[in-house]
């Protein structure tokens, strides 16, 4: 009989970082046969599949962790990589030929990884995206309701003087993980993450401006980078 589930709560230090990540799902970059088995069962095969798929599009990237499809946005500086990324991100827009492009664009898949020093605490969950930055920022202001970084769900609550993050599904050992962290330390980390995503938007702008008017390119870059949609400038 397996042991009863336990909850493990760890208090994190003030050395926190939030690193924005983009998910490079390999399928849109090359049509290669997917290895048989899951990431857990055949990790090396899946890692090579990811590398070979991106290489077909002339992309070579180092993911956050071996076997991951998540890449820190700070590593997305090569114009060719950014062009390929935009090609994939704008596929739905190209297929619809919509007159209002913003209606067919959403924040890029991925999210933010929470680090304590160099230790990975929480990675983005399934269906997470760069727009989840707003959840982290709300949590630093103790607005924990609606905290979302993908599923399985992580819940946030205020337990003075800490912000509590807790998982509601156990790991394979039957342990429910939870973390106490300083809202101030997280606020500093969220501010740095926003700057990284703003830098990504600035790198996307000139490439988007090659096919869209400057104002539309700015709105698209902001949306793709998970920063929301800035207000359109008022007409004179």
Image: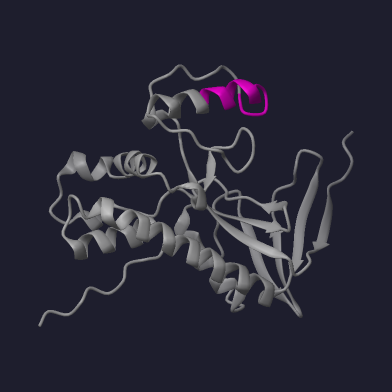
On the rendered structure, is 79 left or right of 231? Answer: right
For the N terminus, the image quarter is top right
Residue 164 coordinates in the image, percent (x, y): 72, 68
- Image-quadrant location for residue 138: bottom right
| Range shown magenta | 38-49
- Image-quadrant location for residue 116: bottom right
Q: Is residue 45 in sight in this rendering?
A: yes
- In the picture as drawn, the residue positioned furthest to the front comes out as 78
- In the picture as drawn, the residue positioned furthest to the left comes out as 236
On the rendered structure, is 236 left or right of 144? Answer: left
Q: Is 41 inside the magenta-drawn segment?
A: yes
- Image-quadrant location for residue 44: top right
- In the picture as drawn, the residue positioned furthest to the bottom comes out as 236
Q: Is 64 inside the magenta-drawn segment?
A: no
Figure label count: 0
Residue 197 coordinates in the image, percent (x, y): 45, 61
On the rendered structure, is 161 left or right of 209? Answer: right
């Amino acid at each position: 009989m397996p042991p009863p589930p336990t909850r493990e709560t760890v208090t994190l230090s003030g050395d926190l970082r939030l690193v924005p990540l983009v998910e490079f799902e390999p399928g849109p970059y090359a049509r290669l046969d997917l290895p048989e088995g899951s990431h857990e069962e055949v990790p090396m095969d899946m890692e090579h599949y990811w590398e070979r798929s991106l290489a077909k599009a002339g992309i070579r990237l180092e993911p956050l962790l071996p076997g991951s499809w998540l890449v820190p946005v700070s590593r997305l500086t090569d114009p060719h990589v950014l062009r390929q990324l935009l090609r994939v991100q704008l596929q739905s827009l190209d297929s619809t030929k919509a007159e209002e492009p913003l209606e067919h664009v959403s924040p890029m898949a991925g999210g933010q990884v929470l680090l304590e020093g160099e230790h990975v605490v929480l990675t983005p969950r399934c269906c997470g995206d760069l727009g989840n930055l707003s959840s982290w920022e709300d949590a630093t202001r103790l607005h924990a309701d609606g905290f979302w970084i993908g599923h399985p769900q992580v819940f946030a609550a205020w337990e003075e003087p800490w912000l509590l993050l807790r998982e509601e599904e156990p790991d394979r050992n039957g342990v429910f993980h939870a973390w106490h962290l300083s809202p101030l330390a997280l606020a500093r980390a969220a501010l740095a993450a926003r700057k990284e995503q703003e830098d990504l938007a600035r790198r996307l702008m000139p490439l988007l401006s090659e096919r869209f008017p400057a104002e539309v390119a700015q709105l698209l870059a902001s949306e793709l980078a998970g920063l929301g949609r800035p207000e359109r400038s008022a007409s004179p």
